[in-house]
Amino acid sequence: MSEMLSVIVDGMWRQGDKSLAVRLVADKGETLPGWQPGAHIDVHLPCGIIRQYSLTGACGDDSYLICVGRETASRGGSRYIHETLRPGQKLAISSPRNLFPLHQADRVVLLAAGIGITPLYAMALQLEASGTPFTLLYYVKKRENAAFVREVSGGWRNGECIIHASCEGESPRARLIQDLPAAHDGLHVYTCGPLEFMAKVRDVAAGKSWAETHIHSEAFQPVAPAANADTGDVFTVTLASTGERWPVPADKTIAQVLLENGVAVPLSCEMGICGACLTPVIDGVVDHRDTVQSAEEKSARDQQVALCCSRSHSGELVIGL
């Protein structure tokens, strides 16, 4: 489990017409743990909800900055932050975790949609500081929706930012084919935003022969189940350390079964988007239902299973607990 930190909401301000930036500082003046672009924290809201938010801004600051979009279909997190959270409130957060790190590259393309700008803005600052050439392409429905407009719009020495607004005929569907350059060894792409946007990025990249290892993404939503998908057959989960085994019925997750039997599981999002519960697989065939792992990771020799959402294609799944 991540170490829990006590922080205070030091400031809140609008970013565009749909988002709020929130600055968090240590409760008692301690130094907050360092982080690198792509990292996120779990925010434990007073209403009992836990949500994951990417850290943004400069990673050398002595505070944490997040930016939260107002979701029309909010499950409670964004609504609480926009309507109830106030400066001076104390919050519990996790230490930063990074499942979306920057890799060494000759050049980088950053593709953001909506609130997906948050980790990519931090990446742009890091790339600028390291002298790595980059292009940040930011897709929004309307220009007034965009967050961090002043920050990303000018003054770059090593990169550029271009904002595309769908209402002006510049939707990702219309732009991505021309915006995404041809693949080459030294070029990496990082993308963050709604699942449909990132799926379109990968479709376009596949058409241009991009290697999976050069495309990196982070999702803010769980994968929607297919219309004809069922919850799967009953299978057995077995602990490699003790040999204990329990059936996992169709209406329960692996994590729920383990918790019911006294096994500690590091849960956070419970939707397969944060990676907190990823656990090594010793034997068995995983039915991967998370969005935090890449297709390459899901087909690798050594795999991990997201206990909160994934299931098993085999009758038994032996896990490294």
Image (cartoon, grey):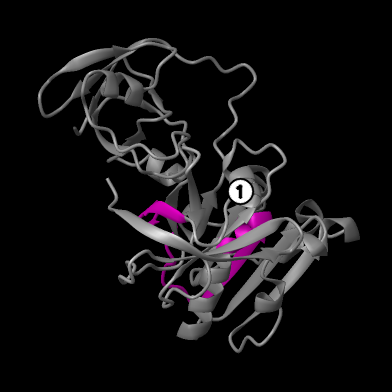
Mark 1 closeness class: few <14, some 14–19, many ≥20 residues within 10 Å: few
Residue occupying the point 48% across, 77% down: 126
| Residue 52: percent from left, percent from top | 48, 48
Q: Which residues are magenta?
A: 90-118
Q: Is residue 158 above or below residue 51?
A: below
- Left or right: 11, with 17 as reference point: left
Q: Secondary structure at mark 1?
A: loop
Q: Residue furthest left?
A: 242
| Residue 211: percent from left, percent from top | 51, 56
Most foreground residue, 149 or 3? 3
| Residue 128: percent from left, percent from top | 53, 82
| Residue 279 occupies quadrant | top left
- Left or right: 280, with 152 as reference point: left
Q: Is residue 230 above or below residue 36?
A: above
| Residue 179 occupies quadrant | bottom right
Residue 117 is a magenta residue = yes
Which quarter of the rendering shows the C terminus?
top left
Amino acid on which disc 1 is placed: Thr
Q: Which residue is mark 1?
A: 84
Most foreground residue, 201 or 249? 249
| Residue 102: percent from left, percent from top | 44, 67
Residue occupying the point 34% across, 68% down: 32
Which quarter of the rendering shows the N terminus?
top left
Q: Residue furthest front?
A: 88
Residue occupying the point 58% across, 76% down: 134
